Amino acid sequence: MDALRKQASKLREQVAKQQQAVIKQFGGTGYESSDVMVIDEVELQRHQQLEKLYRATRNGRDFQKEIVKAAETFTAIGYKHIETGTKLSEDCCKYGAENMNDNILAKAASIYGDARKHVEKEQEDFNKLLSSQVLDPLRAMIAGAPLEDARHLAQRYSRMRQEAETQALEVSRRQARVRESPTPENVAKLHAAEAKKQELKANMAVLGKEASAALAAVDAQQQRLTFQRLVSMVEGEKTYHLRIAAILGEVEAEMVSEKQRKESAPPVISSENGSEKTTYFLAEVTHTFNAESEKELSLSVGDYVVVRKVSPSGWSEGECRGNAGWFPSAYVEKRQRIPTADLAGEVY
């Protein structure tokens, strides 16, 4: 009879273990790689919530690390950009200073060299923004106490869960022994095991709530802070590129303006031999021209000009109303040729 009781007890323990395995298989994947079974429905829901929050905070931290890695790379590239740009600025300014004799390229080099100083200043400001607005806040949260404390609470809950599972199995064994041999000693041990199980369940409920609240707070803070840092990075990069575009736009405009000024300026022609015969012609002014320098000649519509030189650059040199200088060739129309020997007095 005793042998049958022992055999029945072993069978009940085996069935209990199989039931536990089925519950584990369909009740969840376990918390933090744990294969601990759930004790009841309330504990199952709490376990699933903690597991979800634990994974969310882990993923959030990993994403923050990726942003930090990218920002660090941007910063390193930025400092290399500053180093290279500063060297180019110095070379451009040096070339411009050494080749100032009416050289368009030298002037353009000087303009660009000065502008590059402002470009590198914008790059330095952007690097500082990445450091203060992105890197420092994210690094602080990744290694911060709130995240670690919340995860430690969750891990404590996981360990208590394992202890509670072990105690539940102990209660099952005590119950089987009481059924086999309901002695006062076995009953007392069963009651002690059940009391410990209930104590663990109560502690689990308290710790589970604390861990859930802590992880939920960290998860919300991660979401908020990471979003804010992303926005700061986007705004900073946008401002940086807009300012660079504005600087380069001004440089381009100044270069083009300088080129046009050089090309449209009256040509510098060396003085000719006074004995050389020159043919002048009379021209009528068809468009008003206002001189912008001492070398240029102001004209009014209807005036007549004695044209003495015509340059391939589109400028002519002549005399009108007692004044001489250069003016655009297209602003006058030829009327008649005047031999040099016959030229006398002013043209009105």
Image: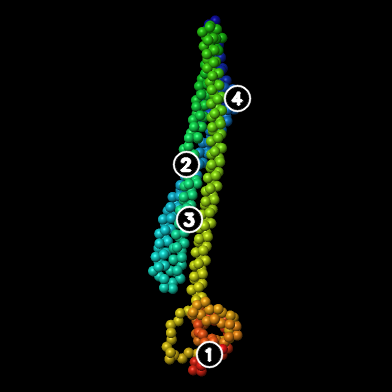
What is the crowding at mark 4: few (fewer than 14 residues within 10 Å), some, or many (at least 20)?
A: few
Tag 1, which secondary structure? loop
Q: Is residue 123 above or below residue 110?
A: above
Mark 3 residue crowding within 10 angstroms, few (<14) / some (14–19) / many (20+): some
**What separation in Å lies between label 1 and label 4 (alpha carbons)?**
113 Å
> Which residue corresponds to the image point at 54% horizontal and 15% vertical from the top-left?
195
Query: Residue 224's quadrant in the figure?
Result: top right
The answer to whether marks 2 and 3 mark residues whose Cβ atoms lie closer than 8 Å is no
Question: At 48% across and 45% down in the image, what residue appears?
Answer: 135
Mark 3: amino acid: Glu
Residue of label 2? 139
* Residue found at the far bottom of this picture: 342
Res 42 label: 4
Are the residues at dot 1 and dot 3 in contact (C-beta closer than 8 Å)?
no
The vertical placement of 23 against 276, above or below, is above
On the question of residue 64 being in view, the answer is: yes
Residue at left offset 44%, top offset 50%: 76
Q: Distance between the residues labelled 1 and 3?
A: 60 Å
Quick one: 18 or 209, which is closer to the camera?
209
Q: Which amino acid does label 2 sit on?
A: Arg
Q: State which mark lies toward you, 1 or 3.
A: 1
**Which numbered disc flags the more N-terminal residue, 4 or 2?**
4
**Which residue, given by chain and number where applicable, does mark 1 sit on?**
346
- Which label's residue is closer to the chain start, 4 or 3? 4
Q: Estimate the x, y position of residue 98 in percent, counting from the top left.
A: 39, 69
Whichever of labels 1 and 4 marks the residue nearer the N terminus, that label is 4
In this figure, which residue is indicated by the disc labeled 3? 122
* Label 1 or label 3, whichever comes before in sequence order: 3
